[in-house]
Amino acid sequence: MQAVTWLKTTARFTNPVIAGLWFVVDRSRKRAGAPTVWAAVKECLDKLRDDVFPAETEFEYEHRVTLFRLERRWKWRLPPKRIRVLVPILRSGFTTQIASTVYSVDTEEKCEGVVGRTIASNKVVIINNLDDVGPNSDPEQIKKYARVTNVSEPHLMDWMNRHERRLPLSFCGMPLEVKNSPWGVVLLDSREPQAVSVKKRKLYELAGWLVGTLIERGGS
């Protein structure tokens, strides 16, 4: 893609977000071994969170960056079959490391969540200004949120009841490729309603490319 080529040669010198990520990638070249690479990937997630989201806001502790990996798992039904799922494996910060939600991406028509839409389209997906939905919200609000974010209403209710908090108000999904094949998604989510700028879509595309480069270097 011409845009990515231009960003690789230019944005790393002009944009602080990309410059920081590029520094992490470049530094990892001087080190060896998968553990070091995964530490660098975690550092990239933290840097994305710190650089993309507003530094001072009412919701500063509710900005997250999560890495999902594309896997095949057995679905135990009759007959049993293996399906493709996106599994959370790494997250920014230290107090929000527990992530358990797995999204099915078995077919293009059955791709769950913002991460599923991202992997199906192989493009950056940005959603802002979602309704502020909680466990006691109006059923129509919950239905609308489920439709926009591509998940089921029972899934949303289960998540809110388990975590005892309201849903994110903005998302950004960045597709990852490793060895020219879909590998996973980096997902940004925030309680800030306009946390992700649509005007920076190409920079998010490059950020995904940089994270994919790091993962490929780790041999995954």
Image (cartoon, helix red, strand yellow):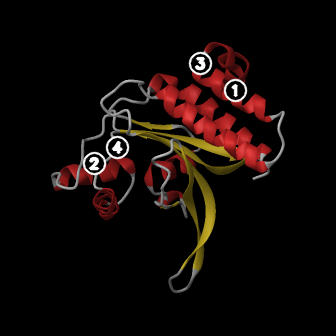
Residue at the extreme top: 14
**Residue count near mark 3 (Cα–Cα under 10 Å), binned few <14, some 14–19, many ≥20:** few
Of the two numbered discs 3 and 2 on the same chain, state the one appearing first in sequence: 3
Question: Is the residue under label 2 in contact with that under label 3 (CB below 8 Å)?
Answer: no
Identity of the residue drawn at 53% across and 60% down: 105
Identity of the residue drawn at 29% across and 49% down: 145
> Mark 3 = which residue?
16
Give the structural element (helix, strand or loop) at label 2.
loop
Up-down: is 220 above or below 92?
A: below
Percent across and percent down for residue 83 are: 58, 69
> Mark 1 = which residue?
22
Give the structural element (helix, strand or loop) at label 3.
helix
Type of amino acid under label 4: Pro
Type of amino acid under label 3: Pro
- What is the CA distance from the residue labelled 4 to the residue labelled 1? 28 Å
> Mark 4 = which residue?
168
Viewer-proximal residue among 188 and 97: 97
Of the two numbered discs 4 and 1 on the same chain, state the one appearing first in sequence: 1
- What is the CA distance from the residue labelled 2 to the residue labelled 4? 7 Å
Of the two numbered discs 3 and 1 on the same chain, state the one appearing first in sequence: 3
